Image (cartoon, rainbow, N blue to C red):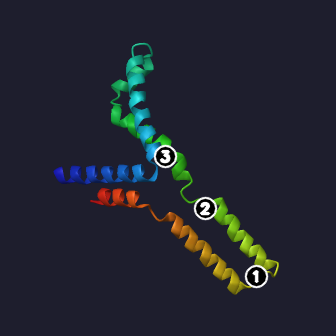
């Protein structure tokens, strides 16, 4: 049983670490929203009977925090596969140049390689972020 709990807590820690690296503002805001939501539900339970049923159903602070984190990271999750419009525009431009005969296929491949190199260069992490990632991995 203890081994299962250790594995689950490790998975939860890893997931939150990833969320804080990918979207630190959204994850922080989600955590804060969850805590505030719990406070609002607790404070208004005497006045709104439905909220009393919710709190009696076992919904606790971690549940509200999880709801807040999911809510604030949902849009980021939906856009995870989107390509930057500037990159798409550059690729279309090169393809149009080939169609118009201004570039050969070989020249287009060179241009594509240049775009890929620029994107990879822009994705490299600054030293501070890289160091934080290393600490998280440990």
User: Which residue is label 1 attached to?
Assistant: 103
Which type of secondary structure does the marked residue at label 1 adopt? loop
Q: Left of 22 or right of it: where is 10?
A: left
Residue 90 vertical position relative to residue 66 in the rendered view, above or below: below
Real-space CA distance between mark 2 and mark 1, rounded to the nearest whole angstrom: 24 Å
Q: Left of 120 or right of it: where is 112?
A: right
The 10 Å Cα crowd at callout 3, few under 14, some 14 to 19, many 20 or more, is some
Which quadrant is home to the C terminus?
Answer: bottom left
User: Which residue is label 3 attached to?
Assistant: 73
Label 3–label 1 contact, CB within 8 A: no
The 10 Å Cα crowd at callout 1, few under 14, some 14 to 19, many 20 or more, is some
Location of residue 1 in the rendering, given as x and y in whole percent from the top left corner: 18, 50
Which type of secondary structure does the marked residue at label 3 adopt? helix
- Kindly identify the residue that appears in the image at 38 percent across and 24 percent down: 39
Circle on res. 83: 2
Residue 125 vertical position relative to residue 38 in the rendered view, above or below: below
Of callouts 2 and 1, the N-terminal one: 2
Residue sitting nearer the eye, 7 or 103: 103
Real-space CA distance between mark 3 and mark 2, rounded to the nearest whole angstrom: 18 Å
Of callouts 3 and 2, the N-terminal one: 3
Circle on res. 127: none
Location of residue 15 in the rendering, given as x and y in whole percent from the top left corner: 36, 52
Which type of secondary structure does the marked residue at label 2 adopt? loop
- Kindly identify the residue that appears in the image at 40 percent across and 38 percent down: 31
Q: Is residue 1 visible?
A: no
Of callouts 3 and 1, the N-terminal one: 3
Location of residue 125 in the rendering, given as x and y in whole percent from the top left corner: 44, 62
Location of residue 87 in the rendering, given as x and y in whole percent from the top left corner: 64, 65
| Residue furthest out toward the right | 100
């Amino acid at each position: 049983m203890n081994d299962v709990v250790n594995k689950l807590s490790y998975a939860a820690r890893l997931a939150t670490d990833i969320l804080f690296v990918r979207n630190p503002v959204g994850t922080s805001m989600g955590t804060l929203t969850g805590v505030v939501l719990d406070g609002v539900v607790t404070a208004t339970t005497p006045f709104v009977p439905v909220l009393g049923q919710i709190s009696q159903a076992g919904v606790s602070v971690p549940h509200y925090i999880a709801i807040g984190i999911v809510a604030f990271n949902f849009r980021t999750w939906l856009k995870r596969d989107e390509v930057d419009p500037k990159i798409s525009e550059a690729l279309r431009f090169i393809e149009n140049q080939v169609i118009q005969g201004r570039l050969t296929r070989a020249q287009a491949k060179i241009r594509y390689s240049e775009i890929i190199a620029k994107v990879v260069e822009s994705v490299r992490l600054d030293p501070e972020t890289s160091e934080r990632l290393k600490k998280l991995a440990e």
